[in-house]
């Protein structure tokens, strides 16, 4: 082979490799966008169900994690602040540990009577969604986001600091309100980040093709101890 032929072969290999990299990046970004769409759709469904059914609904997931579930509690619940001494880890029916953040007022009162020496909110009031005949709606349980897609961060009022490890949830209330929350999704690369912002008054979801962080949820930098939780 002449030098010119060698140079042409190297150029062809380089162009082919770069094209393949761009194609894989485009596919991954499409998957990331689709995953964000799944979460946005689940948020809209949860918002509407909370209003129609008169129940508190939540989207719950692990951080980091590749899936989410939609659950509900009968009636209204109260969210405890991060420094509430009654928050404690409990074991649910499936043997999984969860920090109780949302409490049914009646169950919390019973827990105070039964555990007078140990303040507690009682067991989590949330259960999987069920149909009218009592069957679990599997389409809203362990919904996978897609290959390589992970929920990596949650910014939400009842956690003054962003959640990057552990079980987390976003709540939707019967009165037509939800928590102002931002969920970060990642495909494992530095630039592959999408954010789903949930608006409190409408339940509407906005998808940002970046690691979006609203200032009002992160608190006042001059007064880090005050957040939207305290307002």
Image (cartoon, rainbow, N blue to C red):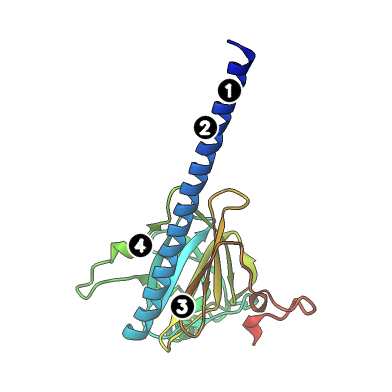
As helix, strand or loop, the secondary structure at mark 2 comes to helix
Label whose residue precedes the other's in the sequence (2 or 4): 2
**Residue sitting nearer the eye, 71 or 36:** 36
The answer to whether residue 115 of the structure is visible from this angle is yes
Please name the residue that numbered disc 2 is placed on. 16
Whether 210 is drawn above or below 124: the answer is above
The relative height of residue 87 versus residue 185 in the rendered view (above or below) is below
**Residue 193: % across, % down:** 57, 57
Which of label 4 and label 1 is nearer to you?
A: 1
Q: Which mark is residue 204?
A: 3
- Is residue 148 visible to us here? no
Q: Which residue is mark 1?
A: 8
Any mark on residue 141, and which?
4
Q: Earlier in the sequence, mark 4 or mark 1?
A: 1
Q: Label 3 vs label 1: CA separation?
A: 53 Å
Looking at marks 4 and 3 on the same chain, the residue that comes earlier in the sequence is marked by 4
User: Foreground mark, 4 or 3?
Assistant: 3
Rounded to the nearest whole Å, what is the CA distance between mark 4 and mark 1?
54 Å
Q: Measured from the top left, where is residue 108 in percent x and y?
A: 48, 82
* Depth check, front residue: 86 or 189: 189
The answer to whether the residue labelled 3 contacts the one labelled 2, judged by CB atoms less than 8 Å apart, is: no
Q: Earlier in the sequence, mark 3 or mark 1?
A: 1
């Amino acid at each position: 082979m002449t030098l010119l032929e060698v140079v042409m072969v190297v150029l062809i290999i380089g162009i082919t490799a770069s094209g393949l990299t761009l194609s894989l990046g485009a596919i991954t970004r499409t998957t990331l966008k689709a995953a964000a769409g799944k979460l946005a759709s689940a948020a809209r469904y949860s918002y509407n169900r909370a209003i129609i059914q008169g129940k508190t609904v939540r989207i719950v997931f692990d951080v980091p994690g590749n899936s989410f579930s939609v659950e509900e509690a009968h009636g209204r619940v109260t969210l405890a602040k991060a420094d509430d001494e009654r928050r404690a880890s409990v074991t649910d029916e499936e043997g999984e540990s969860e920090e109780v953040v949302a409490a049914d007022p009646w169950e919390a009162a019973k827990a105070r009577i039964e555990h007078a020496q140990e303040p507690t909110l009682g067991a989590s009031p949330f259960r999987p969604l069920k149909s009218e005949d009592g069957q679990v709606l599997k389409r809203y349980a362990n919904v996978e986001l897609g290959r390589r897609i992970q929920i990596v961060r949650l910014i939400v009022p009842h956690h003054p600091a962003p959640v990057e490890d552990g079980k987390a949830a976003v709540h939707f209330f019967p009165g037509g309100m939800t928590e102002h929350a931002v969920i970060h999704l990642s495909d494992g690369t530095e630039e592959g980040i999408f954010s789903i912002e949930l608006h409190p008054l409408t339940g509407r979801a906005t998808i940002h093709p970046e690691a979006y962080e609203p200032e009002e949820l992160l608190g006042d930098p001059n007064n880090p101890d005050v957040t939207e939780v305290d307002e």
